[in-house]
Amino acid sequence: MNEKIEQLVTFIQQNCLWQFFSRTWDREENIEGILTKAAELLTGKQSMLETTADKCFHADARILVSDFKSQFPWIKETSADDVKAILAGVKERMRQLTITGSKNEELNIQNY
Amino acid sequence: MAMKLLNCDTTIPERERHVYIKESGEDTTQYLPISNAPTLPGTLSERGCAFCGAKLVIGGVLKDTIQMIHGPFGCAYDTWHTKRYPSDNDNFQLKYVWSTDMKEKNIVFGGEKQLKQSMIEAFDEMPNIKRMFVYTTCATALIGDDPKAVAKKVMAERPDVDIFVVECPGFAGVSQSKGHHVLNIGWINEKVGTIDKEITSPYTMNFIGDYNIQGDTQLLQQYWDRLGIQVISHFTGNANYDDLRSMHQAQLNVMNCARSAGYIANELKKRYGIPRLDIDSWGFSYMASGLRKVGAFFGIEDKVEELIADEYAKWKPKLDWYKERLTGKKMAIWTGGPRLWHWTRAVEDDLGVQVVAMSSKFGHQEDFEKVIARGREGTVYIDDANELEFFEVIDMVKPDVIFTGPRVGELVKKLHIPYINGHAYHNGPYMGFEGFVNLARDMYNAVNSPLWQLAKNDVRQKELSV
C-alpha cells in the first residue's frame, strides 16, 4: 500500500498547484477538501456540492481522479475500502510534505 | 547535492543558501532555497524595485487609467511600455506616460502642490479619462508627501473621477514582489465592492494574474466567450478600472500568476467566500486540464471537451512539428518566479525540452516548492541570481536557449547563446494552445538562427561566410 501511496503523492507533487497555496490553513483545507472528494469519486459515493467551495474542490478532484485512472490502472481494480485507506495515506503524506515538514517560512504568517 | 556554493561566490558564502541542485530522492522538506530575502552586499542583483512591481506589472496594464507617478521622471520612463501589454482600445496605456517630474525645489519644499497640479492637468488634457492610479516613489515617500490626502481633494473637487493611491516606494521591499502585495491589498481594501456590474451569464468568474502580455488575455477570452462564461474582472489584462471594483460578484477566481496576485484571490476567498482555482495557462496539457477544471466547476464539461478537441485539431499538428525538432534541447528559465513552475513541465511534456537551470528574481519559498516539485533532477535552482552566477551556471549546464529578460538577455547574447524574452515574449501571445505554438516557434527560430555563429566571426580577421 505504501508504494501506491507514494505513486499518487509523486503525481500530485509534480502536477497539482493546490498543494502549494500560501498558508497552512489553505493547504490543509485543500488537502482535506480535494482528496476527500477524490475518494468519493473513486468509490462511487455521491458528493455533496452545497457551496462554491465544495464545487471548487470537486472540480480539482474530478480532474485528479481522471488522471489517476489513466496513469495508475491498478486504481480501478482496488476495492472501495482500500481506496479509502490509500487516500487517507496520501492525505497524511501531503500534510507532511507541504505543511508539517515544509521549510517555507511564510506558511504561518497570519495575514496574506 | 543539496545547497551549492558556486565558485564565483566564495567571497559571499551566504549565497549557498540561495542555490540548489536537485538530486534523486530529494524533496522540498529537505532543501529549499532562501528567497524573498534582502539581496546580499557584494552580489549584483537583477531585481527590480517594489514600485516597479506595483506599476509595471499590475497597475500600468489598465487600459482606461492615468498612471500618475509622483517622483522624478526616470521612475515613470523606466516603468513605461518595457512590458508589452496591448489593449483593445488602441493601446491607450502604452501611448502615454505621466509623471509629476519632481525637482530639487519640490523635494525641499514638498511635492503635494505639484502632485495636485499634475493630476488636474492630466485629467484636463484627457477629458474622456476619469480614472487614475497615483504612485509614490522613493523621493516623495522620503519627504513625507501625503498623496491620499491630495487624491481626496481632487475627488472632492471633481466628483466624476475616481483615484487609487499606491503607497509603495522602491525601497519598501526586497524586490518587485512587495509592490504586487501592496497593490493587491490596497485594492481589495479600498475599491472592491464599490461597483456592481450587470450579470449576463449564469457562469461568472474573475481571471486573476494575467496581464495580457502580447494578447494573452484576448486569446483566452475567446475560450471564455465560447464557453459562455462572463469574466467579471481580468486582474489586470486588458481591464478597465471599474471592472476591478466588481471582483466581489464572481462565483469563482481562476488564478494564473499566484505570485503577483495570489493575495487578492486569497482575500476574495476570505472576505467574499469566492473559491480559488489555480491553473496553468501555458502548455497544451496544462491548458486542457485548466479548462476541464473550470468546466467541472460550472457543469459545462461537454462544451469544454468540444473546445479542446477543436483547438487540438487546429494547433496540435503544428506543436508536434516543433516538438520533433526541439526534443532534447536544453533550456534555462531565468525570469521572475512563476514562469519557472508554469513552464518547466509544459516544455518538457509538450516539446521534449529539458529545463536545466532556473532562476527567480522575486519568487518566494512557495514558488520554489512548486518548481522543485515539478523540476528535473540535476537542474540548478537559484534565488536572485547575480551575473557571475549566470556565467558559471551556463558553463555547467550549457543551455541551447535561455528564456529571460532583456537585462540578462544582453549578457547571454555576448556569449552567442540565443535568448527569448521570457517576460514580454518575442512574438506572443504564449498562453493557450495557439500561444504555446508561438512559444515553440520562437524557440525553434532562436536555436536554429545562423546569427549566433556569424556573430563569432571577427570581421577584422576574415571575410564573412554564410
Image (spheres, coloured by chain):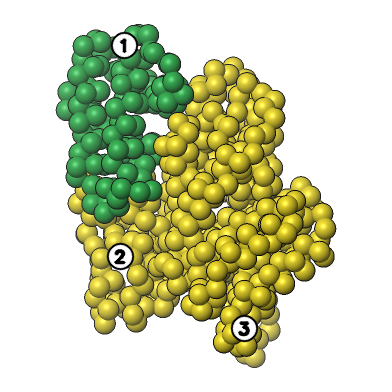
Chain colours: A green, B yellow
Residue A14 vs residue B227: left or right?
left
**Does residue B44 lie above or below A49 as drawn?**
below
Label 3: chain? B
Total tally of numbered discs in the picture: 3
Task: Identify which amino acid the numbered label 1 is placed on.
Answer: Thr
Q: Are marks 2 and 1 on the same chain?
A: no
Asked if marks 2 and 1 touch (Cβ < 8 Å), the reply is: no
Which residue bears the numbered disc 2?
B18
Task: Identify which amino acid the numbered label 2 is placed on.
Answer: His
- Residue B327 position in % (x across, y down): 49, 48
Which residue bears the numbered disc 1?
A43
Q: Are marks 3 and 1 on the same chain?
A: no
Separation (CA) of disc 2 from disc 1? 44 Å
Task: Identify which amino acid the numbered label 3 is placed on.
Answer: Asn
Label 1: chain? A
User: In this rendering, does residue B9 appear at all?
Assistant: yes
Label 2: chain? B
Q: Please tell me which residue is depicted at 32% across the width and 31% down the height of the picture.
A: A29
Q: Please tell me which residue is depicted at 64% across the width and 27% down the height of the picture.
A: B229
Question: In which quadrant of the rendered image does the N terminus of chain B lie?
Answer: bottom left
Kindly give the residue lying farthest to the left in the view shown.
A2
- Residue B63 position in % (x across, y down): 71, 52
User: In this rendering, does residue B344 appear at all?
Assistant: no
Q: Residues within 10 Å of mark 3 (few under 14, many from 20)?
A: some
Q: Report the mark closest to the observer, 2 or 3.
A: 3
Kindly give the residue lying farthest to the bottom in the view shown.
B460
Separation (CA) of disc 2 from disc 3? 41 Å
- Residue B35 position in % (x across, y down): 33, 61
Residue B268 vs residue B448: left or right?
left
Residue B420 vs residue B199: left or right?
left
Residue B194 vs residue A16: left or right?
right
Residue B106: image tag: 3
